[in-house]
Image (cartoon, rainbow, N blue to C red):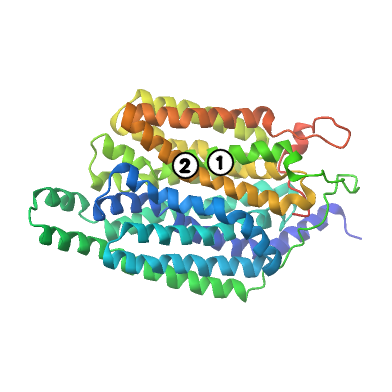
Amino acid sequence: MSTPQSAAVQTEKKAINPIVIIGALFFVFGFVTWLNGTLIPFLQLACELNTSQALLVTFAFYMAYFFLAIPSSFILKKTGFKNGMSLGLFVMAIGALIFVPAAMVRTFPLFLVGLFVQGMGLSLLQTASNPYIAVVGPIESAAKRISIMGICNKIAGALSPLVLSALVLKGAQAIENQLTTITDPAQKEILLSDLAHRVIMPYIIIAAVLIVLALLVRYSSLPEINTDQDDIDESGAVVAPKSSIFKYKNLNLGVICLFLYVGVEVMAGDVIGTYGKSLGMSLDQTKIFTSYTLASMVVGYIIGIIAIPKYVKQEQALLISAIVGVAFTIAAYLTTGFTSIAFIALLGLANSLMWPAIFPLAIKGLGKYTKLGSALLVMGIAGGAILPQIYASLEESMGTQPAFLWSMLPCYLYILYYAVSGHKTKNSAGRNTPAEQTILTVPRDI
């Protein structure tokens, strides 16, 4: 007769193979997502854009999540998780291939189309993979698995700007200086076209890798998981669902929280290069700033894996992260030059544990609504589209550092509120769920 402890160990062992597969997916879409940090200065130079126009890169990419998250949940009902993930990878490959004609004719709107299509595929992947990894093993270790996925994602993210910038932004500052001295329009067009063409081969390779991975996932042994059952409480009784998904306070406030979190994550990761450039730093310096932010996020994930829940509860980790975010944002405002850049990069440390904390807390207790709730949370990724645009608008009126402060500070203060009380749910008796029950808790039947 097996004990609950031995059953949990067996469940964990069965989860190892899916964790490896999903980890590979997180690596791939981390690599693709964080290419935007390099694409912003690249396209700003190649397509002759101002800051506001260049930040449409993040707008086009992340708005796809807003429009496609809900449809993704319905697609997954038809395809199942495995086929849905495979389809998402194929869609991402199509988006990567759109970069080829966009680069050949040097047309910024077509680049934006490619980014939006990539975001479509990622929306499907995110809607499937996040709840999947939460329940593929024991619920008690859900946050640890999410943190491991975060490490896969951010290691790839730290590598991608280094790889792409080495290929497409080599000698970028010299090219920018040369453009200011060229008076012949034809010669200028040749120089910009040659620069734009640098992106073609990397994105062909990305598309090929995505197609291969899509086929591997399609024919893998990745198990399906039933996500349509009711929520079960700790006594094994079925918890009656509420009349509407919008009756769940922790989800409603969690969507806003995730929206703001992704916004500050993108600001710290993708906008840091533009921020540095506005402080007078050269393109050759700023092109790898995104990697610094993502490296600090990896450190944060490792700390989370070690500390949660052994030394600190999950909502406490979110609380600490929000306080650190407030402190580093103010520090970036009060300092200048590379010190200010260092504090923005360290925001990666503050941001690292936010997704692993917010997502499980927001979908806790949703039962049969969990798949739709997950889709609503994925819609919140659109915060990565909106906050950089707010920053760009504020920068024009108040300057770089004040704009960064007032874009970021309110977001971290709201995340702090969610960590303190916004995530709390009610149990069937109407009492607040004890804090210790909210740790790492994701419904068993997502």
Quick one: label 1, few (<14), some, or many (20+) residues within 10 Å?
many
Query: 43 left or right of 431?
Result: left
Which disc number belongs to residue 379? none
Give 380 or 363, whichever is nearer the viewer.
Answer: 380
Write down the residue under mark 2. 386
Q: CA gap, disc 1 to disc 2? A: 9 Å
Which disc number belongs to residue 259? 1
Precedes in sequence: disc 1 or disc 2: 1
Give coordinates of residue 225: x percent, y percent.
74, 63
Give 157 or 414, whichever is nearer the viewer.
Answer: 414
Name the residue at 36% across, 23% down. Answer: 334
Name the residue at 64% across, 39% down. Answer: 254
The amino acid type, in three-letter code, at marker 2 is: Ile
Name the residue at 69% across, 34% down. Answer: 423
Q: Is mark 1 on a helix, strand or loop?
A: helix
The amino acid type, in three-letter code, at marker 1 is: Phe
Query: 299 left or right of 17?
Result: left
Q: Is residue 435 placed above or below 186 in the rendered structure? A: above
**Looking at the image, which residue sits at the far top?**
334
- Quadrant (top left/top right/bottom left/bottom right) for the N terminus: bottom right
Q: Is mark 2 on a helix, strand or loop?
A: helix
Q: Is residue 101 placed above or below 385 in the rendered structure? A: below
Give 85 or 375, whichever is nearer the viewer.
Answer: 375
Q: Is mark 1 in CB contact (under 8 Å) with mark 2? A: yes
Q: Can residue 251 be seen in this view?
A: yes
Name the residue at 57% across, 74% down. Answer: 216
Give coordinates of residue 410: x percent, y percent.
51, 28
Give coordinates of residue 312: x percent, y percent.
66, 34
Give coordinates of residue 361: x percent, y percent.
69, 40
Q: In which quarter of the image is residue 446?
A: bottom right
Nearer mark to the viewer, of 1 and 2? 2
Q: Can residue 339 be seen in this view?
A: no
